Image (cartoon, rainbow, N blue to C red):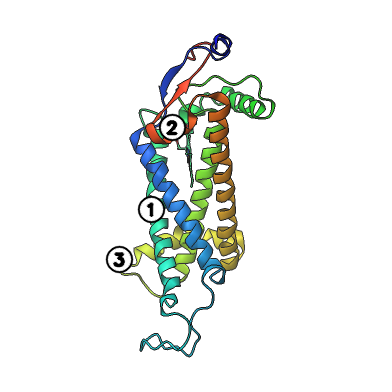
Amino acid sequence: MENKEKKYGDIEMVHRMTVIKRIIHWVFFIAIIGNIITGFYIAYPFLMFGNSPVQADSLSTGVLNSGETNRAFIMTWMRDFHFIGAVTIDVIFIVWLYLAFFSWKEPLYKSFIPFGDKIEEAWKMLKHYFTLKNKPETGRYQDPLNAVIFTLFHLLILLQMLTGFQMYVASFTGTSAVGAWWPWLMHFSTDWTLAVFGGLTGVTLTHLFIMWLIIIFIVYHIYIEVWRSVMWKEGDILIPFGGYKYMRNKSEPE
Ligand code: HEM
């Protein structure tokens, strides 16, 4: 017991996530998991629900000759939930971006600046993951390695939003219910994806590919937060729930 205390130093609580950031985290969690599930269905409908009604069915008269009636609108439901999830993600992304710069409690840029020093710290953390030696001290803000990974994750989300909007606006015929400015804005902000990814098929495949990168992020993220909790014994996993974790630094960080 005495040895352990010497190894870890004094234990102290540190605030790491504001209420709004915790809400963002869990709404992101629900919306992203939801959109992965509905996105899978949109891309590969047969995987989960078998065949849809055959063409002889007349949906306009409500006559279904084959298939289950409850299957008739599954794609519509899936697309609806996918759009609701996407709008939620768009809103959260904008709030997150604002807080990354203007949060007075924990802005993300504090984990990047001064840039040179923070790159070195991120590198030290990576070395610690592989060697289990020289654990970087825990501080008031996210460690720079996590900060870089979270930033990359948000860039993936941004690209996912833009490719999603491009597919969405491609289905528009004429103007929209809210006016011509809406499709114009989406064309203006996302038409470049057609050129970069080689047309609508390329945009669709990129959207699917990014989904896999997001899944990889989620698996890595949960693994590493559990790993940190087990190895460091500082309760990292508690951050998105209570907002706090513990510090066991040998000396006080500034
Ligand atoms: C879809 C699933 C998830 C996504 C997309 C996600 C995403 C994120 C993001 C973007 C951050 C950084 C927040 C910020 O900007 O400050 C974060 C932080 C965090 N997440 Fe998640 N998360 C997910 C699931 C989970 C789960 C299931 C847990 C474990 C209970 C978890 C534990 C944490 C912890 C502990 C942090 C704080 C890390 C730190 O400050 O050092 N996450 N997550």
Q: Which residue is mark 2?
A: 239
Q: Residue at x 42, y 50 (%)?
A: 30
Return the x and y of residue 147 as percentages of the image width and height.
52, 33
The relative height of residue 238 versus residue 14 in the rendered view (above or below) is: below
Q: Which residue is mark 1?
A: 88
Figure quadrant of residue 68: bottom left
Tell me the amino acid under the disc marked 1.
Thr
Q: Which labelled disc corresponds to residue 178?
A: 3
Figure quadrant of residue 174: bottom left
Residue count near mark 3 (Cα–Cα under 10 Å), binned few <14, some 14–19, many ≥20: few
Residue count near mark 1 (Cα–Cα under 10 Å), binned few <14, some 14–19, many ≥20: some
Tell me the amino acid under the disc marked 3.
Val
Question: Outermost residue, left direction?
Answer: 178
Q: Is mark 2 within 8 Å of ligand 1?
A: yes
Q: Residue at x 42, y 87 (%)?
A: 64
Marks 1/2: CA distance? Answer: 22 Å
Q: Nearer the viewer, residue 11 or 207?
A: 11
The reply to whether dot 2 and dot 3 touch (C-beta < 8 Å) is no
Return the x and y of residue 218 as percentages of the image width and height.
54, 45
Please tell me whether mark 2 sits on a helix, a strand or a loop. helix
Nearer the camera: disc 1 or disc 2? 2
Q: Residue at x 55, y 49 (%)?
A: 214
Tell me the amino acid under the disc marked 2.
Ile
